[in-house]
Amino acid sequence: MSSHRISRRLFVSAALAAGSAPWFAWADTPEWPDERQIPPFAIHADFAIETVPQFEGELAGLRRDLATFLTLPQQPTEIHVYLFASASTYREYVTRYFPGVPQRRALFIQANDVPMVFAHRSPHLLTDLRHECCHSLIHQAHKDLPLWLDEGIAEYFEPPQGNRRNRGDYLPQVVQEAKMGEISPLVTLERLRSVDEMGDRQYRHCWAWVHFLRHGPVGAQQALSQYLSAQRQQPPAPVSYFLRGQFADPEADCRRYLMTLGS
């Protein structure tokens, strides 16, 4: 569902480009009707949060689940999450403090080292929050992940925990594309620099490669681990480099793995 996506890199540049836009967006706002802590998230809502079923469990579980994939800081920076009852109030608030930021259903914005997520109540609220809060957590652990991996991880963790491995809106088409040899080569995805270059196909294939790296052969999991270890220390070689150390033809191995998901 790429229609509401916008790159973390664009969030950061857009927020900073505002210049005079206050980074303490909450400071001059009256007390929020509902505020609570779900570490590392500080929630500020203009409606009763308990009206969103499973809200607290979903946010608490997201950090726990992501920690099985990435090494997260023991004491992460507090992430402010602003929730609005209506789309119009949400748009007005974001436009006021961050003029020029493209309008999306939910946003992750980091300005002056303050991570913030903005969203409004809708049938997609928990999906939007899982995606954008995932970006906010990734940014604390690995600030310079390539776009394809950043988005692929967020796409992976976007569904509820029980639906991630067999994501219904992606899996059938990914399996068919694997059978047809139509999964994008990883080196192609690694050349992506902006979400302007990404459509549904690219998001889907980023998810597919992350699936391979997370659940595929041991060599795929080792390649990702090697990459992330190198990434924390210095600008590393791309993930495809580490995969070539494990597989003679990583693209073929990825396709074979994805085809098994349809059985």
Image (cartoon, rainbow, N blue to C red):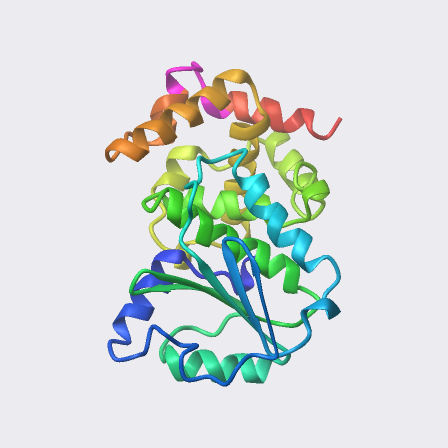
Residue 248 point in image, percent of width and height: 43, 14
Which one is nearer the viewer's eye here, 79 or 192? Answer: 79
Q: Position of residue 199 (x, y in %)?
A: 50, 55
Identified at 51% across, 34% down, the residue is 69
Count the numbered circles shown: 0
Q: 246 or 218: nearer the eye?
A: 218
* Residue at 75%, 62% in the rendered image: 53
Measured along the vertical axis of the image, is residue 130 above or below residue 240? below
Q: Find out whether residue 57 is within the magenta segment.
A: no
**Above or below, comparing residue 221 to residue 168 in the picture:** above
Figure check: 253 above or below 132: above
Q: Please state the extent of the stretch shown in magenta in the rendering.
A: 244-251
Looking at the picture, how far across and down is residue 210, in whole percent? 52, 35
Most frequent secondary structure within the magenta stretch: loop
Depth check: 187 or 98 in front?
98
Tell me the residue at 63%/29% (across/down): 179
Quadrant including the C terminus: top right
